[in-house]
Image (cartoon, helix red, strand yellow):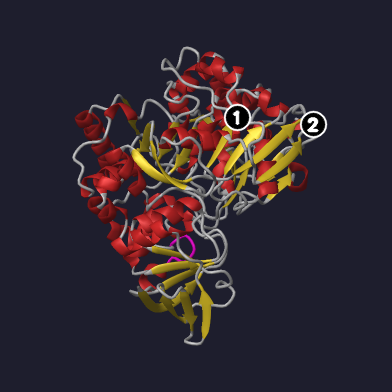
């Protein structure tokens, strides 16, 4: 019997020939990433465990992205501690507030490659599976153990194979695909499992789209989302990653816990309604819902392709006077490219505001908090009650196209009609 | 290990924003975090909860963020254990790592009311409710039991570095 990509990566990193789902193993970690809010806690716990330095400063990355720039003395202190630790340890890479959101920065700066085992102290670390890595989110104490030893224990996950077929219709994006999959699998349908995205639609999809899919694997409880590396992956990695790597692929006789088939050739725009990520409806069922704030950005949909799609719809138009539009590119490099291409100007001319890259708006940290009774429409990944601010606010999740179209009308709008 | 306390039932899908809202992630002192435990769903919980109390959940307890602030806030608020139908993966690991018991007990969520007395007998794998009803705990994986007995991953690693 063959193995899945995930099983092969775990076997390789545990020094074993083969591993089986359910098996508990200890594996060597290739890269440990911590954003500032969890980095400080993890580093302190590492000290309590008895370690004075990280196991390998070349394999640790700290990044200041969750609340950036600082908004008060408390988080300014966290930022300062992060900088001090990075300096003292001599990390090969440390990213300050002028970089961007961790899950964009790691691939963009060439830290992610196929076949690697990547751990991040952030739940959306699963994003990096888009490049054929096994990447998963962990808490601060697990991260502390990794920082001290370079190793962690894992339960080898079973895998759900999601096969997507069909050409994406006009204005239908990878975000619509993943919301449709979340509806199918449910918010706990993939708990402790890997989701392997495959099929003709995925093969034809660019890395930005694959990142959107893998990013939301955690919203189904999954340990990671992963896409088999191919020519598209290699083209993205060219010029970014210098080290040698292997293209790890699933065997044709690998065993899957479940196979989900989805044809997207007639998929409508999808919207996840309050207060659950799997409460997904076709946009046509929620058209006309009032929207007080539109947010385009996040590690799910803050890439150049996303901003470009939204700007195409907003070009030459104004947002409705009853709503506000906030755009947050996922990195400074994306910001600069968008500036060059006139995308930023389009947002500003339409009446939107463009913030610096950060995670704040997505988790109710800063830059875009919802007031009591307000309705937010966002391209991010979670719509839990109170997630973006007031416990009495409402969050709908959608694609960049749906967000842009809705900003123009001030109500949830079908982007195919604009 | 035996735990006896008052139950707080929060039902299905208790996410990490309910347990510890994102706006408090910049706090690092566990006692300060504890002041906001469960604030996303019950703002007065931290004032009402007493040492030894037990949180009851339904399906997918702890879904969402990797924030360890969530189980830490619960632990320092006085909560001794979380018992649920099922747990989300990262919360589950984080709970044991900080020394908070996260126990699966099918059927518990519909059979316990907030305020009921709960007794957890870990060695016997039994939970008794109101001194009468007895429910079975899904046996803990061996490693989680070791972590719990040693008080979490920090003391465990200090004592077992050679085997790590």
| Relative to A349, A271 lies left or right | right
| Relative to A130, A122 lies left or right | left
Where's residue A221, x and y in %? 56, 49
Dots 2 and 1 on the same chain:
yes
On the question of residue A72 being in view, the answer is no
| Relative to A158, B29 lies left or right | left
Magenta stretch encompasses residue B42: yes
| Relative to B86, A358 lies left or right | left
Residue annotated with mark 1: A210
Towards the viewer: B126 or A75: B126
Instruction: Give the residues drawn in magenta, as a range.
Output: B39-43
Where's residue A122, x and y in %? 43, 42
Query: What chain letter is assigned to the residue under label 2?
Result: A
Query: What chain letter is assigned to the residue under label 1?
Result: A
On the question of residue B134 being in view, the answer is yes
Numbered circles on residues, count: 2
Q: Residue A174, located in which quarter of the rendered image?
A: top right
Where's residue B115, x and y in %? 47, 80
Magenta stretch encompasses residue A66: no
Q: Magenta span: helix, strand or loop, mainly? A: loop
**How much space separates mark 2 and mark 1, taking CA atoms?**
17 Å
Towards the viewer: A391 or A217: A217
Q: Residue A66, located in which quarter of the rendered image?
A: top left
Residue at the right extreme?
Answer: A266
Residue annotated with mark 2: A265
């Amino acid at each position: 019997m063959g193995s899945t990509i995930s099983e092969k990566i775990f076997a390789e990193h545990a020094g074993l020939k083969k591993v089986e789902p359910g098996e508990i193993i200890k594996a060597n970690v290739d890269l440990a990433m911590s954003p500032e809010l969890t980095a400080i806690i993890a580093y302190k716990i590492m000290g309590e465990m008895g370690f004075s330095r990280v196991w390998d400063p070349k394999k640790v990355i700290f990044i200041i992205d969750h609340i950036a720039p600082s908004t008060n003395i408390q988080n300014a202190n966290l930022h300062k501690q992060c900088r001090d630790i990075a300096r003292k340890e001599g990390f090969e890479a440390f990213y300050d507030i002028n970089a961007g959101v961790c899950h964009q920065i790691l691939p963009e700066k060439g830290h992610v490659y196929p076949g690697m085992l990547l751990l991040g102290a952030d739940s959306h670390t699963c994003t990096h599976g888009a490049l054929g890595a096994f990447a998963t989110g962990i808490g601060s104490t697990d991260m502390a153990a990794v920082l001290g030893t370079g190793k962690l224990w894992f339960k080898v996950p079973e895998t759900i194979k999601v096969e997507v077929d069909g050409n994406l219709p006009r204005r239908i994006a990878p975000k619509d695909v993943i919301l449709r999959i979340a509806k199918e699998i449910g918010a706990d349908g993939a708990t402790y499992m890997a989701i392997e995205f495959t099929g003709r639609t995925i093969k034809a999809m660019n890395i930005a789209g694959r990142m959107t899919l893998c990013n939301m694997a955690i919203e189904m409880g999954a340990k990671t989302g992963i896409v088999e590396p191919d020519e598209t992956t290699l083209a993205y990695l060219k010029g970014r990653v210098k080290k040698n790597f292997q293209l790890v692929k699933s065997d044709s006789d690998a065993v899957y816990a479940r196979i989900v088939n989805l044809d997207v050739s007639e998929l409508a725009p999808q919207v996840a309604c309050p207060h659950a990520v799997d409460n997904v409806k076709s946009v046509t069922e929620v058209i006309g819902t009032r929207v007080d704030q539109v947010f385009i950005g996040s590690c799910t949909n803050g890439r150049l392709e996303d901003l470009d799609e939204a700007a195409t719809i907003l070009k030459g138009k104004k947002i409705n006077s009853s709503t506000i539009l906030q755009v947050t590119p996922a990195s400074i490099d994306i910001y600069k490219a968008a500036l060059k291409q006139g995308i930023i100007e389009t947002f500003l001319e339409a009446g939107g505001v463009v913030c610096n890259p950060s995670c704040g708006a997505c988790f109710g940290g800063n830059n875009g908090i919802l007031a009591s009774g307000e309705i937010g429409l966002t391209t991010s990944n979670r719509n839990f009650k109170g997630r973006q601010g007031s416990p009495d606010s409402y969050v709908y999740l959608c694609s960049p196209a749906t967000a842009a179209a809705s900003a123009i009308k001030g109500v949830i709008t079908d982007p195919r009609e604009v | 290990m035996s735990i006896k306390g008052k139950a707080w039932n929060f039902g299905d899908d208790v996410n990490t924003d309910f347990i510890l809202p994102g706006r408090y992630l910049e706090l690092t002192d566990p006692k300060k975090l504890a002041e906001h435990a469960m604030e996303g769903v019950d703002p007065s919980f931290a004032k009402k909860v007493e040492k030894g109390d037990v949180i009851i959940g339904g399906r997918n307890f702890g879904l969402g963020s990797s924030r360890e602030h969530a189980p830490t806030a619960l632990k320092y608020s006085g909560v001794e254990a979380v018992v649920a139908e099922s747990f989300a993966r990262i919360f589950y690991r984080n709970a044991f790592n900080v020394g908070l018991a996260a126990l699966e007990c099918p059927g518990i969520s519909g059979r316990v009311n907030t305020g009921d007395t709960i007794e957890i007998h870990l060695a016997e794998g039994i939970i008794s409710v109101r001194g009468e009803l007895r429910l079975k705990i899904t046996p803990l994986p061996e490693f989680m039991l070791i972590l719990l007995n040693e008080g979490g991953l920090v003391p465990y690693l200090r004592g077992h570095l050679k085997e790590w």
